[in-house]
Image (cartoon, helix red, strand yellow):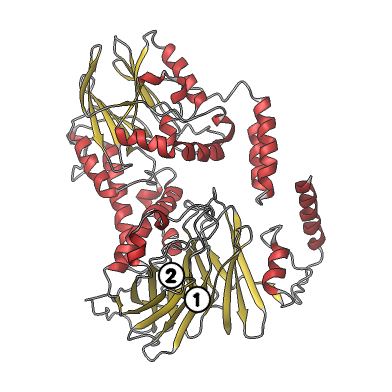
Amino acid sequence: MKWFVALLSVSLLMAGTAGAVSPAVPDRASMADPLDSPRWEDMRKTFFGKARVVFDDRVKVVAPVTAENSLNVPVGVDAAALSGVTQVLVFADFNPINEVLRFYPERGLAKLGFRVKLQQSTPVRAAARTADGVWHVNGVWVNTAGGGCTAPSVGSSSPEWQSRLNEVSGRVWSREAANEGASAASSSSSSQSATETPKSPDQLRLRLRIIHPMDTGLVAGIPAFFIQQLRLADEKGRGLMRIEAYEPVAENPVFTIDLPAGLAASRVQVTGRDNGGNAIETWVEP
Amino acid sequence: MNSTLYKRTHVLLRSGLRHLILFVLAIATTLASADGFDYALKPQRIADDTWVLVGRSEDFTIANGANIVNTAFVVTGAGVVVIDSGPSRYYGEQFRQAIASVTAEPIVKVLITHYHPDHFLGNQAFALETLHALPDTISGIARDGNAFAENLYRLSGDAMHGTEVRVPPKAIAPGPFSVGTHRFEVLALDGHTGADLALFDLGTGVLFTGDLVFNGRAPTTPHARIEPWLASLERLDALGARIIVPGHGAVSEAMPASQQGKPASSPHVSIAQTRDYLRWLNATLKEAAEQGLDMSEALALPLPPQIQRMAVSASEFRRSVSHLYPAAEQDALTHAHSHRY
C-alpha cells in the first residue's frame, strides 16, 4: 500500500509541475526534480534548507548508467562553467549515508573526480554553491546491483593497510585546457614536458591515491573509519583545494584535481586526517 | 507476455519502491509460468560425434534467459562427454533433452570450464558425480556461486526459476583421458579467470576453449589478468586445432596459411581476434592512466572501428574499465614521484 501512495504522489507531482514551470524565475516550490526521485524533497530540506536551489546544466556530473562494481563507482563533477563557486556538495539520494563529499575549490577549478560506494540504484548529484548563496544542482541516475555500503572493505580483511595507512601516491600532469582528456602531455619523472604548441596555457592535473579502508560503520563489528579532511596547498602554503570526505567515498580513494596554470608549478602539499586522528602529510612532486 | 510486463515495470520505476513491486510481480510471474522458459536449443553437428549449442552474442537479458553461452557434447560410443552446463536449471534440463534427441548413450562426464555462472548454473540437471572441474574452479563456485546466481536472477528473471548452485565434486587434473573411441587432452590454463579449462579432442581436432576465446564478441574481464590470458592463447594456438569452439560466438575452422592476413597471426580468427582485443584493451587503459585520465574520463574513451565491429564491445569496454583501470592507474601513480616526510 505504501508504494502505491508514493507512486500516486510522484505522478501527482509530475502532473502538477507540467504547466507550472516559468524558467525565468525559478521558484524552489515549483521546481520539479529532473531525475524524478521520490527522495528529492527530503534531500532539499536536509542539505539546503531555505536556501535557493536551481537545477543547472552547467554543473556536470558524469557517472556510468550501470555501475559494474558498486564498491567503486567512478564519478566526475565539473562546475567550472559557473563562476564564484565556493563549495560543491555531492550526495546520493538512496544511499544509507547520503553525503559523499564536499569540496571547496579555493584556487583550484571547481572540478573533482573520485569514486563512491553505492548501496542501491540512486541519483548521484552535485550541488555547487555560488558566492550569491544559490545552490546549482545537477545529477544522474546510476543503476547498481547494490551492497556497496554494507560490504566490508577489502582492506578490513587484510593486515596490509595498517602498515600503509594514509600512504599517498600522487602525480602531477600538465595538460592543455582546451584538449580535455583526449591527449594530455605527461610531465612525469624524467620527461621534460614537450614543447609543442604553447598557445593555450596548460592546466595542471593532480591525481592522488590514498591507502585507507574507508569503512562505513554499516558492517557489523567494523566501526566507521574514513578520511575526513584533505587540504592541498602550493609550496608557499596557499590553499589550492579542500576536500571533506564522508563514509561513501570508495576504499583507497583516488582523486583527480585540476588546477589553473601556474598555480602549482613547483610541488603540491597534501595534508589531512581521518576520523581516527591519523595524519596524512605528503608532497607530490611534478 | 509476463516478461514484457516485467521489463516495462523495470524501466518505469527506478526507485527503491520498485523492489517491492518486482517482488509481487515475481510471485505472480512464477505462478503463471510453471512450464518454464523455452530456450529452443538446437544442437549443431560440427564434427564426427561432436555437437554444439551456440548462444547469442548479447548481454544477459530477460528475453534471452542468459543463453549467451556455447555448450557442447561429444558422443564417444561409451557415453557422452559434456562441456559446460549452461546458465540455468531450465537450460540444463533442455540441454539434456537435446542430447537425448541425438543419442541414447548415458552422460558420463560434465566438464565445467570455469566458474562464471553462465557456464555452470545448469549443473542441477546432471548427476552430481559426473560434474568435473579444475580445483580452483570448484573452490570459486563454492565461494562465489550464490552471488553470481543472484546477479543472473536480477539480469535474466524468469528463466532462472528454480536454479541453485551445484558445486562439482570431482577435481580434474591436466593431461590425457579417453572415453570410448575419443582421446582428449585437458589443459589447465588461466587468464580469463584464475582457472580456465580447455579440452582438446585429439581425434577430431576440435578444441573447446571455454572463455579463453571469444568470436565476434568482445571478451569479458571481471576476473581477468591479461598477461596470463595472452600466454594461454599462445598455448591454444600451438595445439594445431582444426576447429575451435569458443565460449561465446561462432564455431570456426582453421584457415589455411594462404588465406591468413599478413603478418599471419593465427590460423584461428577467433584466437587472433581475442588476442588483438586484449592487447588493445591493455594498451588503451595503460596509456589513459599514463595521461592522467580520471576513471570517468576513461569510460568515455572512443572505440576504434575494428573494436566497434565486435558485438557488445561498447558495454564490455566500460565494464573492463571498471575491472582493470584501478590497477593501471595505480601503476601510473606509484611510478611517479611521491614522498612522505
Query: Mark 2 belongs to which subunit?
Result: A
The quadrant in which the N terminus of chain B is found is top right
Extreme-front residue of the structure: A221
Alpha carbons under labels 1 and 2: distance apart: 10 Å
Q: Position of residue A194 (x, y in %)?
A: 27, 78
B189 w.r.t. A49: above or below: above
Which kind of residue does numbered mark 1 sit on? Answer: Ile
Q: Position of residue A104 (x, y in %)?
A: 53, 80
Q: Quick one: label 1, few (<14), some, or many (20+) residues within 10 Å? A: many
B174 w.r.t. B291: above or below: above
Residue depicted at 55% across the width and 23% down the height: B38
On the same chain, marks 1 and 2? The answer is yes
Residue depicted at 79% across the width and 62% down the height: A17
B63 w.r.t. A286: above or below: above
Q: Is residue B317 visible?
A: yes
Q: Position of residue A174 (x, y in %)?
A: 35, 78
Residue B207: image quadrant is: top left
Q: Position of residue B147 (x, y in %)?
A: 48, 40
Q: Is residue B35 left or right of residue A199?
A: right
Give whichever of discs 1 and 2 has the lower sequence position: 1
Query: Mark 1 belongs to which subunit?
Result: A
Mark 2, residue position: A255
Question: Which label number is shown at residue A243?
Answer: 1
Name the secondary structure under disc 2. Answer: strand
- Contact? badges 1 and 2 (CB < 8 Å): yes
Residue depicted at 41% across the width and 80% down the height: A271
Q: Quick one: label 2, few (<14), some, or many (20+) residues within 10 Å? A: some
Tell me the mark number nearer the camera, choosing from 1 and 2: 1
Q: Is residue B45 visible?
A: no
The quadrant in which the C terminus of chain B is found is bottom left
Residue A9: image quadrant is: bottom right
